[in-house]
Amino acid sequence: MTEIFKNLIAGEWVGAAKTSRNINPSNTNDVVGEYAQGSVEDLNNAVAAAKAAFPAWGRSNPQERYEILKKASDEILARREELGKLLSREEGKTLPEGIGEATRAGQIFAFFAGECLRLGGEAIPSVRPGVGVEVTREPVGIVGMITPWNFPIAIPAWKLAPALAYGNCVVLKPADLVPGSAWALVDIIQRAGLPKGVLNLVMGRGSVVGQALLEHKDVHAISFTGSVNTGRKVAAACIAGNPMKKVQLEMGGKNPLVVLDDADLKTAVETAVNGAFFSTGQRCTASSRLIVQNGIHDRFVDAVGERLKNLVVDDALKSGTHIGPVVDQSQLDQDMKYIAIAKDEGAKLHWGGELLNRETPGFYLQPALFTETTNAMRISREEVFGPVANVVRAKDYEEALALANDTEFGLSAGICTTSLKYATHFRRNSEAGMVMVNLPTAGVDYHVPFGGRKGSSYGPREQGAYAKEFYTTVKTAYTLA
Ligand code: NAD
């Protein structure tokens, strides 16, 4: 009997008329569970519950919030292996990657437990005699969250932890494709002692639950992570409504990794393979554009090709698997479409790109590496979101930097070099929000800001102490003494 997972509304688990099947992409015969597909009415009830809970929670004692977040962190970390397994089963990243992501969720809650106690304000001398000025931060109110499928526990965690730490009430709509990890996370936080209605979970379709969340007049802010196309609609809806909503968007990438002639070849190959192909290339920070200087180009391409031949693509939960399956049929179709586009554009397929059969039916794709591509080709300009990368040649550092910045996106960018001069210049002149030197473009710390520029991000940064820019609003108070 398949287990049915309900929505959390006003502190109660509430069933829905419709459910959707959460399928294991490593084995499509394996059903992870049936998850509620919420309605507009469910969403409205969730917002009403959040609104009713806000006056008390918004003024709650930071010690109370600290204890709840710390307790949630402790349980996430104690159950990291079980949560990691659920994550890998529903999303398809390998078990070590799944456990790593669950661990990160626990660490984020520990960090923001501390932040509950650290939120301060400022007392500033007035320019007028006898007047005192005080600047304080208050919660924004009711925050709606819309999350994607590729980090099913970390992204809900890095939005929920600061929102709750700073006294907001929340309605979370996770990705309909992969709701299991978000459900487990919400269950843990709720049992950690949250008052009813502070946190609500409404699973379901973006066009139904997500859209209703964007249009609800009692929601004050929306934090969204997902594709650029959806992000634009989210921002437009937030501004169109009355009152307008505060909005934060984290979206796609076409992240460059520059490899200079002076790079350590082994470091460059590992950095490229990890950044481009691990987690099945399904990371917004994946280095899908490898910009390689002529002198090292052939050695680099051959070494990456050899490394790819030795990577095991198989069931995400099997030990020894390096790359799990693609998340579902529709993402696999998109990957295959871009492989065909690259070939049509004249790119040379150096390795991979074939569908693979394994013991169980799943969405297995050999990682694909294209060479002889230009930065003008669609394979260089559009986000594929799969294990597909292409190499663009550069004659020198200056051309490599120009190519790296010649993109609509600006999330993460990397360089492999042993030159301090080039590393420093790249850090200063890259037009990305995050820059990596001799490290993969994907893979970031949990206590520092995360986010991009240009088409990749909009609004205040996520994570670390910077998260308060979004989850609090500033009040300036003047007092005549
Ligand atoms: P998506 O845009 O299809 O969906 C994201 C979320 O939006 C889902 O919960 C979906 O149900 C919801 N949604 C869809 N239509 C909606 C609507 N009309 N109104 C409200 N909500 C709606 O993205 P996805 O396929 O789930 O995720 C992949 C994308 O996410 C990639 O582009 C990737 O780069 C991006 N991503 C970005 C970051 C980052 O931090 N920059 C992190 C992870 C993923």
Image (cartoon, helix red, strand yellow):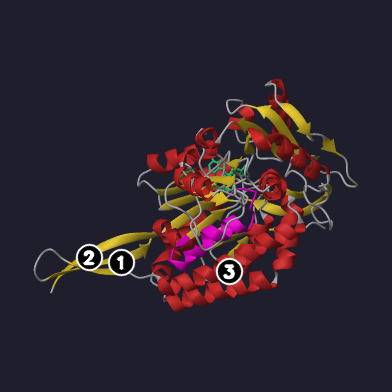
- Residue topped by disc 3: 190
Magenta span includes 451: no
- Residue topped by disc 2: 477
- Identify which residue is drawn at 35% across, 64% down: 138
Which span is picked out in magenta? 148-169
Q: Is residue 78 left or right of residue 155?
A: right
Q: Position of residue 316 (x, y in %)?
A: 79, 53
Label 1 element class? strand
Q: Amino acid at mark 3?
A: Gln
- Identify which residue is drawn at 47% across, 77% down: 64
> Which quadrant does the C terminus fall into?
bottom left
Nearest to viewer (mark 2 / mark 3): 2
In this orientation, which residue lies closer to the viewer: 380 or 395? 395
Marks 1 & 2, CB-CB < 8 Å contact: yes
Comes first in the chain, label 1 or label 2: 1
- The dot on residue 136 is 1
Q: How many marks?
A: 3
- Identify which residue is drawn at 60% across, 52% down: 174
Categorize mark 1 by other alpha carbons within 10 Å: few (<14), some (14-19), many (20+): some
Magenta span includes 154: yes
Location of residue 453 with respect to 16 vertically, above or below: above
Label 2 element class? strand
